[in-house]
Amino acid sequence: MVQVSMKLEMSDTPGQLVRALKPVSDTGGNIIAVIHQREERREKKDIISVQIVVELPEGRLEELLARMRDQGVSIQRLGTQRLLHRRSLIMIGHIMHTDLTDTVDRIDKTGFAEVSELEMIMPAISEPSSARITIRATSAESMDRAVEVLREVAREKDILVIEPLGEES
Amino acid sequence: MIGFGTVGQGIASVLMRKDLGLTITAIADSRSGLMRDDGVDLAGVLERKRGGFVVGDVGISPMDVVKRGEYDLLVEVSPTNIQTAEPAATFIREAISRGKHVVSSNKGPIALHLKELRRAALSHGVQLRYEATVCGAIPIMHVLEEGLRGNSVKSLHGVLNGTSNFILTRMAEEGLTYDQALAEAREMGVAEADPTYDVKGIDAAIKLVILSNTIWETDLRLEDVVVTGIDQITPDAIRLSEDEDATIRLIAEAIPERGICRVTPRLIPRNHPLVVNGTLNAITLTTDLAGALTFVGKGAGSIETASAVIGDILHIKERYARGA
Ligand SMILES: NC(=O)c1ccc[n+]([C@@H]2O[C@H](COP(=O)([O-])OP(=O)(O)OC[C@H]3O[C@@H](n4cnc5c(N)ncnc54)[C@H](OP(=O)(O)O)[C@@H]3O)[C@@H](O)[C@H]2O)c1
């Protein structure tokens, strides 16, 4: 999935916004945010400006844009970015026996980040295990906060967390 | 020259094969001293030392050499003591108070007393240089003071400890456990009998303190650095990082603007410039004008460290020697 933000202009007529956004689901995407900017362009009456952020399967963007244009939408600006922020970290320690569910929950509970992948290798019992944990978050700041939560949990559970170099916001 | 071990002998052998216009007028090891105003016979001293004998007269102590020797510049290459910095700090203070320049490869006095020693050197009108204390052969201090004039350094990242980098490299290359890689490092003479300082990140932290205090003129102490070693790293952890096209390296990091000063194992892309193999060292400086610069080189070794010491000596000779 890719995350795309775009600025759209369309006529300010009833039902137009719904029609304009229908191609998003038609192309397998999700709308993450819609921001109206009615104030911005008062001089152009009867035109509304909308900023949207959608999540889209790879390779469907051109199709989406074409379908939107067919609905009378003018695309003013376009930016793609990776779907949410993603960061992988390594953990070493007694990951399983220090309540892994709780470790994951503590991040998921934040509301702004979640554990999207976890791969763990467990050697002989009583040996420390190793895991790669991938966190996705809504923004760079949320990611930093999520990693701080993980650090705290790791401190409590005596787990070593290895953070990536140079990905802090 | 105080200390005639790996580094001291490296310097002597370079001076024997290259005419750099330098004369060693006195040498001391832990138990003896030798003073010859017209120049020590280096070949003879090297032979004696390699044969297991002391360098000079057991009736002459290292302190006698520092206090009474005839010299312009003290080369201080005795062992590092990171708790007390002694006896090196005393040697250095004494030489400075006699109006002698000092070049040291010794991390102890520089990490613990840089400000004080610098002030003393300034008030006695002498130079104090210590290129060899960090990153072995990489002339990072020269780069900082000359090549990067006018720049502000924003951050520093480095692989500052060859032993731990060797261990992590071998774990990644061969899937060795930490203990196996450490044993191999010991066998190859890359790790000391007691590798604690290297594998616990302390040696790297000491070097980070020296670099930070030099670059930002701070008063950072070893206790201020957050330190995590590599002794808990598992081959599984490295394998898991490789799935992300990354590996694990012990990285020293200082970003004063964000209050960051730490030595920790980090997940780092395999094609990152700081991912160097074996005992190499690497350092990246990010500056406002030059952007990011990375330097890679041998972090230790007899001749490599001698290179750094000699660079300092010649720097002083060319700029500050009497009659220069
Ligand atoms: N080796 C490297 O690659 C390297 C790299 C960078 C920095 N350094 C630093 O450079 C310094 C020297 O390292 P090295 O590898 O040459 O050490 P080394 O091989 O252990 O040699 C140390 C020398 O200092 C002498 N010494 C010991 N105690 C002394 C004392 N109280 N007074 C005077 N001399 C004394 C020893 O005497 P004896 O011969 O009688 O034992 C020996 O000759 C250390 O501070 C080290 O941290 C080393």
Image: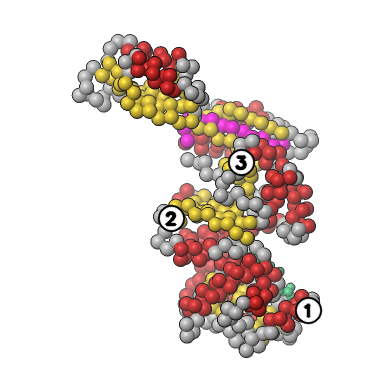
Camera sees residue A65 = yes
Could you tell whether A29 is left or right of B15 in the image? left
CA–CA distance in space, label 2 to label 3: 27 Å
Q: Are marks 2 and 3 on the same chain?
A: yes
Q: Position of residue B36 (x, y in %)?
A: 65, 88
Query: Farthest residue in the top direction?
Result: A14
Q: Quadrant of residue A70?
A: top left
Amino acid at circle 3 = Ala
CA–CA distance in space, label 1 to label 3: 49 Å
Q: Position of residue B21 (x, y in %)?
A: 57, 81
Residue occupied by mark 2: B290
Q: Position of residue B32 (x, y in %)?
A: 72, 81
Residue occupied by mark 1: B53
Give SS at disc 2. loop
Q: Nearer the viewer, mark 2 or mark 1?
A: 2
- Whether residue A138 appears in magenta in the rendering, the answer is yes
Could you tell whether A96 is left or right of A53 in the image? right
Q: For the residue carrying disc 3, how many other residues have a C-alpha within 10 Å: few (<14), some (14-19), or many (20+)?
A: many
Give SS at disc 3. strand
Q: Are marks 2 and 1 on the same chain?
A: yes
Start-end of magenta stretch? A129-140
Is A44 placed above or below B285 here? above
Residue occupied by mark 3: B246
Amino acid at circle 1 = Phe
Is B126 placed above or below B225 here? below
Is B296 placed above or below A145 here? below
Q: Quadrant of residue A79?
A: top left
Give the residue displayed 38% in from the left and 28% down from the top.
A78
